[in-house]
Image (tube, rainbow, N blue to C red):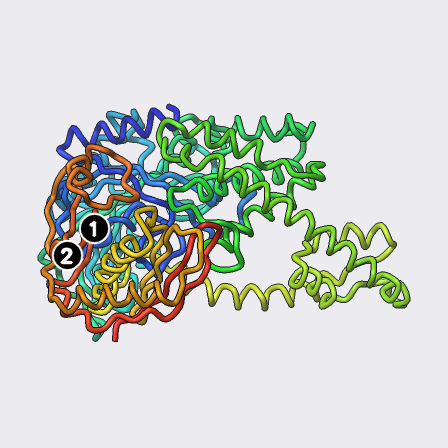
Amino acid sequence: MTANELRKKYIDFFVSKNHSQIAGKSLIPENDPTVLFTTAGMHPLVPYLLGEQHPAGTRLVNHQRCVRTGDIDEVGDFSHLTFFEMLGNWSLGDYFKEEAIQMSYEFMTEWLNIPVERLSVTVFAGDDAVPRDDESAAIWRSLGIPEERIHYLPRTDNWWGPAGATGPCGPDTEMFIDTGAPGVEGSRPGINDGKYMEIWNDVFMQYNKTADGSYERLDRRCVDTGMGIERTITILQGKKTVYDTEVFQPILERIGALSGRQYGSNEEDDRAFRIVADHVRTAAFILADERGVAPTNVGAGYVLRRLIRRAVRFGRKLGFDGPFLTNPAELVLEMYREPYPMLQNRAEEALSELRAEEERFLLTLRKGEHEFTKMLPNLQKSASATIPGRIAFKLYDTYGFPIEITEELAREEGLTVDREGFDVAFRKHQEQSKLEGEKNFKGGLADHSEQTTKLHTATHLLHQALRDVLGDHVAQKGSNITTERLRFDFSHPDKMTSEQLSKVEDIVNEQIQKDLPVSFATMKLSDARNAGAIALFVDKYDEDVKVYSIGDYSKEVCGGPHVAHTAELGRFRIKKEQSSSQGVRRIKAVLE
């Protein structure tokens, strides 16, 4: 079964179970300061998991583009990926454990034809705070999964959330396929020895963790599931790795044709092949996303830059000494034309940005080589003929010069590198980066406090005011909201004048003072556009959407949350206007 076939089967199955298919969303989350990328199918559904009414109903299904880079240094092995597709179905206060597990079982055994004897499952073992999930275990037994293939695992394995200190959370049940590999003695699901491969995960949000650390049962219980396409087709096709499937084979073949080398020849080259293939696929999706970001030194742009530069580094191991990434990137965009047609809208721009970043890094490498040459006379005077780790790390940290290239050049000059010293400096740097990253990659439910709700509502007023002052070419390109401020990116070619900024600020405050009512209506996207609503980042033309109106001033397709009246917002003040990227400006503003 191919990825395209699995994607269609999954959607068809859940539509047959009265689920509404909804469109997947951008890789760049809207108004969620907790993540840089959409890391799971549930992220775009946060307001609805927290209680908002979804325009498509209480049973939903979709396929979602995701990026996770927490294990970026592990990519290159047989299983880790930075970009992947997630299939998901949701119950928003509708069905719960019994129906969710029964549907999972039916899809696996009847639609995917997975033999029951190859299935094992895990459930939450319970602890002092929450009892064991005997309910899920009993459902699995009733479906024919024997007791010896039902494993009770702790919170670290079978519990989700909350995202922060408090909020919705609950046990999950995970489904595994026996791959037939021998595994270690005492192997079981959850042990990463190759014998059991996780295929699906059903999360049951049935508790609310309170500020005192106790768990209350929720009246409105939700189900959130996830099945990774790449991992699942690997199992269904009987392949050893995701790179052996049709998802990666064309990309690997293209890299091989360009480099003159063949994937499968030796493990060192193969690892470089896999890293380049994974990273170029991820970079292509990020760059061509409807909210695509450009390579920068901060946030999502920094992650993108790191992916591209890592691909270039490993491309050098395959013999590439000039730009080459746009060729396989173009292939990636073509391969995904059918499930993600919106990528074609930015394909040309994405490929141009990719080539520019690749050329910048090649220039960086040349500068690093120049710095190395300048250091060489002093290094050669050392009796130990060893380049200190701190010097190697300086080349890496200051000039972006990879340690592997420093080692290559050192060998050519009869020198060695104090790799242990470099690793110490690098680990210190990594730990600091991880601390920073945890602030942005913790994932899960976004902050929907009273203050962020006010700021989110203010972005609607700001968006319309910018269009009133600058023109209808203004369109939202990104938004990030914390409890302290809003950040709003929009299309506009020039720096705004102080007069324009004052006018925008005055318009927003005028609408706030009018105490306009905030309301919403559910309608088809086509009807929303005909009614004059601003509708960005919506993929399916016939999809039901929520249209929020602020009096008769602003009308925009959005998921929420919003205040009831504009007078709740207080005073709006713009603190800064600056460039975000070419043709995109950024405003930071607060409510006082």
Residue 484 placement (x, y as % from top left): 31, 71
Q: Quadrant of the C terminus?
A: bottom left
In the drawing, what numbered circle is on residue 498? none
Q: Is residue 466 above or below residue 261?
A: below
Farthest front residue? 499
Residue occupying image coordinates x 21% and y 47%: 557
Percent x, y of residue 88: 27, 40
Instruction: Kindly tell me whether residue 555 is visible in this rendering.
Output: yes
Q: Nearer the viewer, mark 2 or mark 1?
A: 2
Look at the image and tell me whether residue 445 can be seen: no
* Label 2, residues with CA under 10 Å away: few <14, some 14-19, many ≥20: many
Residue that appears at 38% across and 67% down:
498
Up-down relation of residue 138 to residue 458 (above or below): above
Amino acid type, callout 2: Ile
Amino acid type, callout 1: Gly
The foreground one among 581 and 282 is 581
Q: Which residue is mark 2?
A: 550
Viewed as shown, does residue 187 lie left or right of 476? right
Q: Secondary structure at mark 1?
A: loop
Where residue 385 appears, x then y in whole percent? 86, 62
Residue drawn at x 13%, y 33% is 18
Residue 580 at what x, y percent from top left? 45, 57
Q: Residues within 10 Å of mark 1 (few under 14, many from 20)?
A: many
In the rendered image, which residue does mark 1 sit on? 559
C-alpha separation, residue under disc 2 versus residue under disc 1: 14 Å
> Toward which corner of the image does residue 276 lie, by quadrant?
top right
Question: Where, quadrant-wise, is the N terminus in this rendering?
Answer: top left
Query: In what element is the residue under mark 2?
Result: strand
Which residue is nearer to you in this view: 243 or 589?
589
Q: Quadrant of residue 150?
A: top left
Q: Which residue is painted at 77% across and 60% down in the image?
A: 371
Q: Position of 273 compared to 215: left or right?
A: right
